[in-house]
Image (cartoon, rainbow, N blue to C red):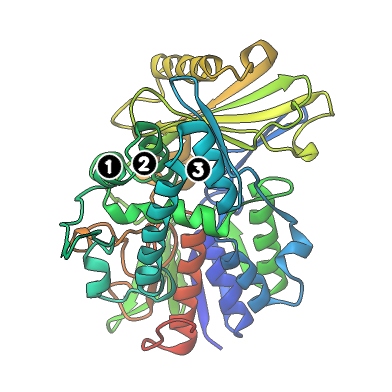
Amino acid sequence: MARIVVVGAGMGAMAAAARLATAGHRVTVVERGEGPGGALGRFAREGFAFDTGPGLLYLPAVWRDLFVKTGREELAERVPLARVDPAAEHRFADGVAVRLPAALGGVRQALDQALGAGAGERWAGLLGRAGAVWEAVRRPLVEEPLTGPPPPALARDPYPARPRGLLRRRPPGTLAEVAEAELRDPRLSALLVATAQEYGCPPGALPPGAALFAYLEQSFGLWYPRGGMRALAEAVYARCRERRVEFRFGVRATGVLSREGRAAGVELAGGEAFEADSVVWGAPPPGAPTPRGLSRFTLLLALRGPRPPGTAHRTLLHGAEAGAAVRVLRPDDPTLVPGPGHEAVVVSAPAPAQGEVDWTAPGPVREWTQRLLAATEAAGLGLRERLLWHEARTPADVAGDTGVPGGVVAPPALAGADGALLAAPNTGRLTGLYRVGALAHPGGGLAAVGMSGALAAGLIVEGPEWRGSS
């Protein structure tokens, strides 16, 4: 039995801790904050409750697998999961709206009805090619650890070139070019690009392989846990405690101790040394610069009046240009409101990181608050007239909650660009040092950080040659 210290109590760190403790190791988690969950925060006031981080779960099998591998009680017995259907309602600047059902057949019909004949077929064809991307990168990008330079499969973009007669076209260079060439409708293009940006992908030169996010949503669904995403964090924390993981909150690790080229524990603020046989680092490195990327600006809206029947759980409001959309989450969850005559709504949009904008100043907060409320009004959602009160959450708040400089929301890793879109390897500079969380392979997003915990635990339990579960 080895003594292992895990730095951070985010979701990736707890996923590693639960697996390592189940394997018989003595695991201690040190966390600078006062509780577990990392980005899966909760804001509560006057009987209303809101998730302050991710609002929906994709690839839920990652977390189901954690519960299967670490105990008898399955995830669904702790946190009931419901598939979101429709997966999304999209509202465009020209007044057109379309709901995308969970089933692909229904999606084709919905797109044809809203955007014209042939729109559904073009969308389905693109998703088919995105499915080929997923099959090409699934194992090296998600299911296998990264312990050195990226394999060739991850250095090049896997989006297939479309045949043209007996020749093959040069593949488009960006996701936007793919959308323009294959979808031939600016609203479909907006839908595709905004879906990628929902996962934190920055605007601009997204590679064609980013189309896989639309494929993943359609194929595996988006899921909502009763009680909100915070309920998932609490369930994982409870599983860690059941496996006898020790947690020390309010304790900040400042560096890794080394002995003869091995990680030998961590140094804590104040100079205390915490010795261990292995270190799993699940927090931003001390002194790390602000990573490239975007954060999110979020409004938490407490509304009078019940949630209207038939309201979509997720609505994306598209502006006049393709790209980032305003996201409106309206869960049908009575545990989040003080009574049936109320609704809790979360409105958010990608925003510059703290530092690029001073989010501690009142001006940007007022401007963005009005911008998001105006977007919901223009879309005809009727939220402002029902507003009891609102709370703004800025990139500065995200930075404070997660410790990530600037409050940047790290996207999942992507293949292509000679590996520039990948996250840091799961192994560190020292033997016995491992990385987990949004800044480690396979990147950000709840599914990816959960996998980072599984990969680090696999390397520790099975050894450095382990290449993931088959």
Q: Which mark is residue 176?
A: 1
Placement of 418 over or under 173, stated as above or below:
below
Q: Please state the horizontal and vertical placement of residue 120, each as a whole percent of the image.
A: 47, 45
**Can residue 210 be seen in this snapshot?**
yes
Question: In screen coordinates, is 51 left or right of 339?
Answer: left
Residue type pointed to by label 1? Ala
Q: Is the residue under label 2 in contact with that under label 1 (CB below 8 Å)? A: yes
Residue type pointed to by label 3? Asp
Question: In screen coordinates, is 327 left or right of 169?
Answer: right
Placement of 466 over or under 449, stated as above or below:
below
- Residue designated by label 2: 193
Residue at 61%, 78% (x, y): give it: 21
Which of the marked residues, 1 or 2, is nearer the chain's N terminus? 1
* Extreme residue in the top direction: 385
Spatial distance from mark 1 to mark 3, Cα to Cα? 33 Å
Spatial distance from mark 1 to mark 2, Cα to Cα? 7 Å
Q: Please state the horizontal and vertical placement of residue 92, each as a whole percent of the image.
A: 46, 26
